[in-house]
Image (tube, rainbow, N blue to C red):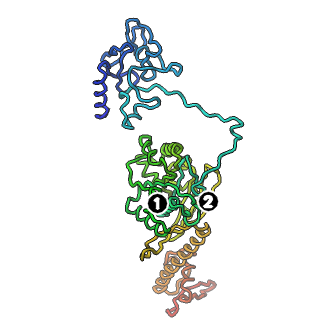
């Protein structure tokens, strides 16, 4: 036991002078009890003595009878007086205070509660009834799906959290902040998607810090023409709160989400401190948020990291970092990908609520002039997915040209040192592949002269710099 638990136990025993403590059978922790007649439960060397009749854990009362219903005192699923096993048909009664039904003492300690003595096991609670739908219930009309942003399939109301995943510097957090500001102000999301009714949005930042997050909101608002101060509490920000996605923080998450429509949490990994994102157990935090969302009708949007994939990697959902339980546990999942100087490609990977993913699209994040500063504002604008293809193709072509120019200079140097090298000799001198050598020679153009020289029956193409010696 911790010192805090020990002091609590001492206080409890002071208030219950008839109680005794020791170590019960089948348990690694201490227990205490009073007999059904109010007398202290006898202990022998810290162990519970057997009943005279032979039942373990019994109490040698004068009558040697079994406890009557209502007199049983259960620990580890068994009455510590007579050994009676707990059953749902005969709920236990105890002279010892207990935590509310369904709450273990371990959970009480995690939540800071001290309603039950440390170490007294709870009797199992009755199972929750299972709802089974019959034919008419299955055939009943379905309610309309409510959306935060219909065009991207972002569902509102209670349910599993949404996921926005992307690798570093792919613009995912800026896009999430722009989305939050648009929803709070009732402006088109990313400049195109309608948000007619203002929503109450909370941004929980566990990554950037207050200065950068506020500065970005100010720049986004300037470009959007929104007065931040006029939004009141429709847009709220909590920076580095001492919270984790664990059951012990559930009530505090509920307080944050109550009365709001969307909570953006940046990021899943930061809020899951101490948990292994590659373990399926990380889903427990997502399920907890989903339960709180059902209670508050506030949907959570989690910002998460993705891994960079190679040309032969499957990509898609497999780009999301961590256990597959993360993808399985969310409603909608969006994957952001971008290279420096390129538009952000957005892929809608999953749509649990309505089953229809939207077409891929692109986001362009750009500085805009504001208040005399060329970078005073920041805008996120949606474009068609073809823009990503076009820009990436142009970027690749530029990269190839730059590489060919660099390789050309390598070839120039080799020919300056050794004029008249053949193709194989030139490849050996420069270390270039056949394709790269061809591209380098094309980049040099007329600066290199190729001559066919015959030696016997063999014709060799030799390379010379124009103006150089043979």
Q: Secondary structure at mark 2?
A: helix
Q: Which quadrant, please, contains the N terminus?
A: top left
Q: Nearer the viewer, residue 54 or 212?
A: 212
Give the image location of residue 187, x and y in percent: 54, 63
Task: Look at the picture and state if 301 lies above or below 397.
Answer: above
Residue 148 x %, y %: 57, 55
Q: Give how far across and how far down residue 364 sits, in percent.
A: 53, 69
Whole-Å distance between the Cαs marked 2 and 1?
A: 24 Å
* Location of residue 207 (image quadrant): bottom left
For disc 2, the neighbor class at 10 Å (few under 14, some 14 to 19, many from 20) is: few
Q: Report which residue position mark 1 lands on.
A: 231
Q: Nearer the viewer, residue 450 or 329?
A: 329
Identify which residue is drawn at 53% across, 70% down: 342
Q: Please tell me how many numbered marks the rendered image carries.
A: 2
Q: Quadrant of residue 212?
A: bottom left
2 on left or right of 332: left
182 or 453: which is nearer to us? 182
Q: Secondary structure at mark 1?
A: helix
Is 454 left or right of 225, judged from the image as shown? right
The residue at 56%/80% (across/down) is 423
Question: Between 166 and 453, which is closer to the camera in this rendering?
Answer: 166
Residue 132 position (above or below residue 150):
above
Up-down relation of residue 303 to residue 370 (above or below) = above
Residue wearing tag 2: 151
């Amino acid at each position: 036991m911790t010192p805090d638990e020990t002091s609590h136990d001492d206080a409890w025993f002071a208030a219950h002078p008839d109680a005794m403590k020791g170590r019960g059978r089948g348990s690694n922790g201490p227990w205490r009890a009073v007999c059904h007649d109010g007398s202290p439960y006898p202990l022998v060397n810290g162990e519970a003595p057997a009943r005279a009749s032979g039942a373990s854990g019994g109490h040698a009362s004068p009558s040697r009878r079994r406890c009557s219903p209502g007199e049983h005192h259960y620990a580890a699923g068994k009455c510590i007086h007579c050994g009676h096993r707990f059953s749902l048909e005969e709920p236990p009664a105890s002279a010892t205070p207990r935590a509310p039904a369904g709450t273990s003492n371990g959970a009480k300690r995690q939540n800071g509660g001290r309603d039950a003595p440390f170490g007294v096991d709870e009797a199992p609670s009755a199972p929750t009834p299972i709802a089974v739908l019959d034919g008419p219930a299955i055939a009943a009309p379905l309610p309309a799906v409510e959306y935060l942003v219909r065009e991207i399939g972002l569902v509102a109301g209670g349910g599993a959290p949404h996921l926005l995943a992307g690798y570093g510097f792919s613009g995912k957090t800026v896009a999430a902040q722009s989305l939050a500001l648009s929803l709070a102000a009732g402006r088109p999301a990313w400049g195109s998607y309608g948000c007619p009714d203002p929503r109450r949005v909370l941004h929980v930042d566990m990554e950037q810090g207050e200065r950068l997050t506020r500065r970005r909101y100010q720049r986004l608002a300037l470009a959007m023409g929104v007065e931040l101060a006029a939004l009141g509490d429709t847009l709220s920000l909590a920076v580095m709160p001492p919270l984790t996605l664990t059951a012990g923080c559930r009530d505090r998450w509920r307080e944050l989400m109550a009365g709001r429509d969307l909570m953006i949490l940046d990021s899943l990994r930061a809020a899951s401190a101490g948990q292994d994102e590659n373990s399926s157990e990380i889903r427990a935090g997502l399920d907890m948020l989903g339960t709180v969302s059902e209670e508050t009708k506030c949907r959570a949007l989690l910002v998460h990291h993705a891994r960079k994939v190679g040309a032969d990697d499957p990509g898609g959902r497999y780009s999301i970092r961590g256990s597959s339980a993360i993808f399985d546990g969310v409603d909608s999942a969006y994957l952001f990908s971008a290279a420096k100087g390129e538009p952000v490609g957005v892929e809608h990977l999953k749509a649990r609520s309505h089953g229809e993913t939207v077409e891929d699209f692109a986001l362009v994040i750009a500085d805009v002039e504001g208040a005399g500063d060329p970078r005073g504002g920041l805008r996120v604008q949606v474009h068609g997915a073809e823009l990503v293809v076009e820009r990436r193709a142009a970027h690749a072509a530029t990269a190839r040209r730059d590489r060919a120019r660099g390789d050309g200079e390598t070839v120039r140097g080799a020919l300056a040192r050794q004029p008249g090298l053949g193709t194989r000799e030139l490849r050996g001198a420069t270390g270039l592949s056949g394709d790269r050598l061809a591209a380098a020679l094309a980049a040099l153009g007329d600066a290199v002269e190729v001559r066919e020289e015959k030696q016997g029956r063999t014709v060799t193409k030799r390379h010379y710099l124009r103006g150089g010696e043979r």
